[in-house]
Amino acid sequence: MYTCAECAKLACDSGDESAYPANCPSLDADRDGLLAAYGEGEDREIARNAALVEAHGYCRLTRVEEIMDFARRNGFSHLGIAFCIGLQREARVFARVLRASGFTVDSVVCKNASLPKEELGLAEEDKISPGEYEPTCNPIGQAQALARAGTELNVLLGLCVGHDSLFMKHSVAPVTVLAAKDRVLGHNPLAAIYLADGYYHKRLFPGRKATEPPSGADGP
């Protein structure tokens, strides 16, 4: 079992292999295979340019700016936006920013093709508004539409949990994320993590006292 989330050493960040804990995934990694995977082609360029974006924009560029920097470094001029219908305003502004910076932009909403939820086997009681027409989100359709448009890099904006998984699975172009949707927390899902030992403790750790540390908190 790998437990990097609880690791107290993080020796991989220093390169000190002698400090790797016994269950470190670094010990099981095929380093030669990994180096070969990054050795040439698109994966090498994406990894290299991602590192350059980090190096030149660290704590300086916003994520919007980083996405544009990353696209330029990779030679991507045609970008796609796959967005949630509830974030159309944000998608419109983002598309305007990209076009003002010289990019060609195609955007596809999650409800494209308007497939009724009944077609996926949902009952009326499984709808947000039973008795009314509700199209299902269609992330596969979003990926297919952006592939037809010929986008070179696709940006996710607020797709539902699981729908984002399907989009990334079916996207032809590489995918990055502008924002994850969390309607309760103003699209800042990490707020629940920051409040996990405070306001949200009872919701996230049912049956555990606030002073009781989670299992494995001491690390390997």
Image (cartoon, grey):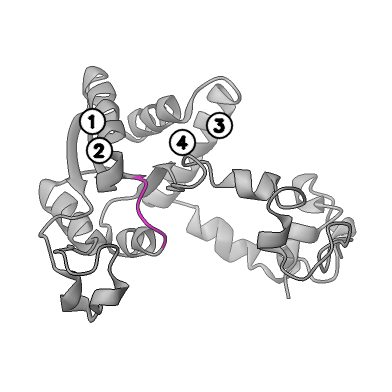
Residue 105 percent coordinates (x, y): 19, 34
Compute the Cα span from label 3 to label 1: 26 Å
Q: Please state which amino acid type lies under the numbered disc 3.
A: Glu
Q: Please state which amino acid type lies under the numbered disc 4.
A: Asn
Residue 89 percent coordinates (x, y): 26, 32
Q: Tell me the SS state at disc 1.
A: helix
Which one is in front in this view, the residue at disc 4 or the one at disc 1?
1
Q: Is residue 70 left or right of residue 214?
A: left
Q: Residue at position x 49%, y 47% from top?
A: 184
Residue 76 visible (yes or no): no
| Image: 67 above or below 24 | above
Which one is in front in this view, the residue at disc 3 or the one at disc 1?
1
Q: Earlier in the sequence, mark 4 or mark 3?
A: 4
Q: Nearer the viewer, residue 127 or 13?
A: 127
Q: Nearer the viewer, residue 45 or 124?
A: 124
| Image: 194 above or below 4 | above
Q: Earlier in the sequence, mark 4 or mark 2?
A: 4
Q: Nearer the viewer, residue 58 or 37?
A: 58
Q: Tell me the SS state at disc 4.
A: helix
Instruction: Return the residue at label 3.
Output: 54
